[in-house]
Image (spheres, helix red, strand yellow):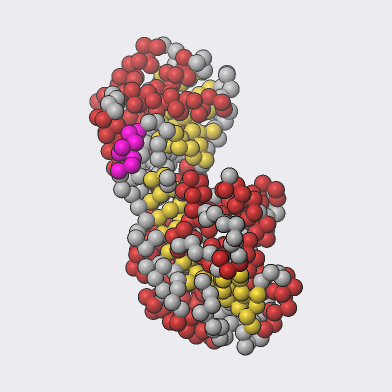
Amino acid sequence: MAVKILSTTQIREADAFTIKNEPIASLLLMERAAIACVQWILPMLVKDQQIRIFCGPGNNGGDGLVIARLLSAAGFNIKVYHTGSHANHTEDFLTNFDELKNQGLAGIEEISDSSSLPVIEPEDLVIDALFGSGLARPVSGIFGSIISCINNSGAITIAIDVPSGLFCDSYSDPRAGKIVQAAFTLCFQQPRLAFFFPENEDFVGEWEVLDIGLHPEFLEAVITNNNLLQENDIWPMLKARPRFAHKGTYGHGLLIAGSYGKMGAAVLASKAGLRSGAGLITAHIPAKGYQVLQTALAEAMVSIDESETHFSRLPELSAYNAIAVGPGIGMHPQTASTLKLLIQQTEIPLILDADALNILGENITWLPFLPKGSILTPHLKEFERLTYKVSDSFERNKLQTEFSVRFGVYVILKGAFTCISFPDGRCFFNPTGNPGMATGGSGDVLSGILLGLMAQGYTAAETCLLGTYLHGLAGDIAASYYGFESLIAGDIIDSLPEAFQQLAG
């Protein structure tokens, strides 16, 4: 089941529901969270290493105090820093502060102003427990000074729950307040929306979700639009192949692709469509591309356009179960006019990529006429051309969702944690994929995969989720052989068989 990405308010509600209905005391829930953190941290510790834990006044600070007590009991060299004046500290913080003092193993120091900031050595380990996910305003003052001290130290920093100063549900402007730059973030139970956006990468680092036993009844019932895909969501979608199947069983996909100088896009997308299981793929290409495609891919059929160099006329559409258009087609005016005819005449959802999206970006009045359930696969700039420029990823995520709902289409916004928005307002972030896939032709491969799946009879929703996950998984397999720098789009196609086998398990 996809992991729900909860808001800050929903996380608080999950804690409260668990405390009431498990039932469990809040102190014991804090202990459970700290134990999960310590179990994750222990393998990376060196026995004589100085571990510096910075604790804020709230329950995130309380987590840090419990971590300090547990690590001290295990024989590690712990120093805890707090800001004194316990008037605004939570009750659970104060209880754990007293327990740590009574244990008598950790050093405890108060930071009253900038002059009392510690000297952090690069070889130290820093644990950030200043503020958790409930932060509501930018961090400044003494806490801002502490964060600057941590960031300037060069020490590896582990953030508990979220990096202090980072908002979970809205943009965090580093010019407005200080934010911890963590190497690792250990968040509790569910990932935070902020983790999926590029502007937060330097703050979050590598993140890990730790199960702290929040009540499953709440997690099952809570409603959220944002979700993180899991392999268990994907493999049940795979259709079994009956013994007496034939090529007609698995559909006929039409790929409209290629123009003079861009025939590689048609080759890549056609091959990916066939590798994804389509019974037949026909590529409609300019006449000059005929020899290229037939030489590169004997298994694909070809529909030859009247134009030597670009897409200028529609083939007969009735024979096809799925249609993808866009890879390498260029921006010729005749191509734009013919794309408009395709939108008007097709009775099935379209898969639109690359130059098809760029043409739509210049003709946004066509958007309401897209067949419902069509799939658009833009990268960030292509999506910006379809909509408008936004200031941050949170706004873009909102805009993407609104776009899908308004036009009744699926949008696969490509990038790290590719976001798939549904016409019903739901979003799914994809965990597969890697930086090596940032290479020419990778998007053409995705279009081919989607075409191959839709031709077989997968629904548009299944096509988006399964296709995006497979594309990233094949990229991960390819990267394991070639590394990030040497990976090319064809490697993704060549890794599709292993990706299917891995999912089929």
The quadrant where residue 363 appears: bottom left
- Residue 220 on the magenta segment: yes
In this orientation, which residue lies closer to the viewer: 298 or 470? 298
Marks counted in the figure total: 0
Residue 230 location (% of width, % of height): 48, 46
Spot the residue most to the bottom.
Answer: 306
Q: Which residue shows up at 35% across the image and 59% down it?
A: 425
- Residue 153: image x %, image y %? 53, 34
- Residue at image point 40% right, 40% down: 190
Residue depicted at 51% across the width and 71% down the height: 321
Tell me where residue 41 appears, x and y as whole percent: 51, 27
**In which quadrant of the rendered view does residue 302 lie?**
bottom right
**Depicted 253 relative to depicted 436: above or below:** below
Q: Is residue 198 visible?
A: no
Q: Is residue 437 above or below residue 455?
A: above
Which residue sits at x=48%, y=37%? 208
Q: Is residue 32 above or below residue 329?
A: above
Instruction: Give the camera-side residue of 4 and 176.
Output: 4
Q: Quadrant of the N terminus?
A: top left
Given residues 478 and 494, the one toward you in this image is 494
Of residues 194 and 209, the one drawn nearer to the viewer in this rendering: 209
Type of secondary structure dominating the magenta stretch: helix
Q: Is residue 344 magenta?
A: no
Q: Position of residue 143 (x, y in %)?
A: 37, 35
The answer to whether 414 is drawn above or below residue 37 in the figure is below
Instruction: Locate the C terminus by quadrant.
Output: top right
Q: Quadrant of residue 57?
A: top left
**Does any portion of residue 14 appear in the rendered image?**
yes
- Residues in magenta, as a range: 214-221
As drawn, the residue found furthest toward the front would be 244
